[in-house]
Image (cartoon, coloured by chain):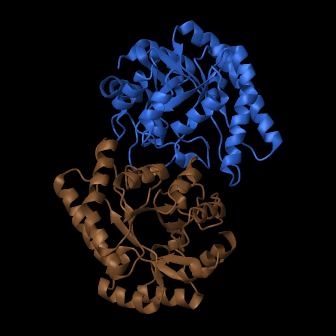
Chain colours: A blue, B brown
Amino acid sequence: MDLSLCSINTITVRSLGLRPLIDEALARGVGAVAPWRDFLATVGTDEAARLLRGSGLRVTSLCRGGMFTAADEGGRRAAIEDNLRAIDEAHAIGADCLVLVCGPLVGKDLAGSRAMVRDGILAILPHATAAGMPLGIEPLHPMMVADRSVITTRGEANDLVDLIDSPTVGVVVDAYHVWWDPYLEEQIRRAAGRILGLHVSDWVVPITDQLASRGMMGDGCIDLAGLVRSVRGAGYAGPVEIEILSDHWWSQPPAQVLDLALERFVSAI
Amino acid sequence: MDLSLCSINTITVRSLGLRPLIDEALARGVGAVAPWRDFLATVGTDEAARLLRGSGLRVTSLCRGGMFTAADEGGRRAAIEDNLRAIDEAHAIGADCLVLVCGPLVGKDLAGSRAMVRDGILAILPHATAAGMPLGIEPLHPMMVADRSVITTRGEANDLVDLIDSPTVGVVVDAYHVWWDPYLEEQIRRAAGRILGLHVSDWVVPITDQLASRGMMGDGCIDLAGLVRSVRGAGYAGPVEIEILSDHWWSQPPAQVLDLALERFVSAI
């Protein structure tokens, strides 16, 4: 795929600062970036907004809101407050959407935890709608249900979008999380018109760390070209984010990681 | 649950030999055991069959057949031959079913790999039917799709059972693999009359090794009592297998592991 349709997620080269990342993206003809919030915090939201808006780069997402689940009412309220701030930050930097990593299991109650996610999204929906900030529900791999997200499959994310039924709420497709799903294609078709983002990395065995074992595109077993075709077929025409959380790639010089990632972006996707 | 409805899977205390395991089970009032094939191989199938049939213990399953996926025709044929032997072994020891761990992804072709699984089961079906040996499709956790099984969810296992449409083929429910699934309850109801076995362990974070990180029942976040209720509600009345693959528990004295596992079986399930 052409690099004008590439977005570099900051986590992929997290040792770079925001200005160096913008410079790298511009120098390489990359069309977009996507920051994590802690990455913005290093320069402050106002300065980040100034740099990003001044760069002419598209900002495909802010990662992340969500984490709505908590054992008590105070925890859930704090999460909602934090999401309202995240919406403001996403708006400030002109992001296409705020990614929602929905939050882990509380106790042993999957249904109850999933209800907390639904209630949390409903609670922040008016603010997101007023800000014109789309919320992208990103289902995470089922191996992360106890750590990060009780929302696991594309089908479940679609169900949640249908239930909430607001033009502000859509879904984000991340290859690493959903590639294994036997119902993936039909659920991507079902999400047509509601896909807010597409993230790529690869599944390289062995997975030694659930969070930070993501592979470089082309090194693993995900049919990324097929996935991108499906998502394009469902109408998503925006950039594709390279989001690689990897202890291995974080230990390499960021410019070299970008070299390889962009080469693979062009050749493998 | 009463120990008469407990089955000890040999992998849980794999350092025990077959005769010591049988003695432990009988001494503790456990109603059943479930061997892995390599465990049988240590004494030979004939001797294992003599010991098991003489013990009066029920044998809930033989683990495992399957592994139908392979890059070439020769590999797939070898897998089928091995499954025919596994059916004979399961028959010899009087197992309730042969568990199928269906086989990992080949290349990047999920659909093709899943078709190999279907074709493999169809190829061994006449022999299993003639032997009166039920085949239990066990979906594995999606994190194992590149290593062990392209059949991942209860829904997918049910689809496969419907497609094959033979009274010889059913499903096995393993808590560790399927607990996270938002559609679990409806898919267990859908499997009513076709559930051949129920395996328990627990999900204890962090999962440091995908294969051998299973937790002791009650130590983790799976609602085992709820799962067992669902499976009982779908008509499965047989024993529940304790199947804990764990580097931690394997490093402990097997008699102590059994003490704790049976205590938890009674209190937590």
Instruction: Pick whichever, B165 or A161, lies toward us.
Output: B165
Task: State the quadrant of the N terminus of chain A.
Answer: top left
Residue B135 placed where, x, y %? 37, 66
Instruction: Pick whichever, B46 or A243, lies toward us.
Output: B46
In the displayed image of the protein, which residue is found farthest to the left? B74
Residue B148 placed where, x, y %? 37, 56
Quarter of the rendering containing residue A24: top left
Inspect this view and state whether residue B207 appears: no
Quarter of the rendering containing residue B46: bottom left
Task: State the quadrant of the C terminus of chain A.
Answer: top left
Relative placement, left or right, of B267 versus A247 is: right
Quarter of the rendering containing residue A45: top right
In the displayed image of the protein, which residue is found farthest to the right? A74
Residue at the location (69% across, 25% down)? A86
Instruction: Pick whichever, A192 or A40, lies toward us.
Output: A192
Inspect this view and state whether residue B85 appears: yes
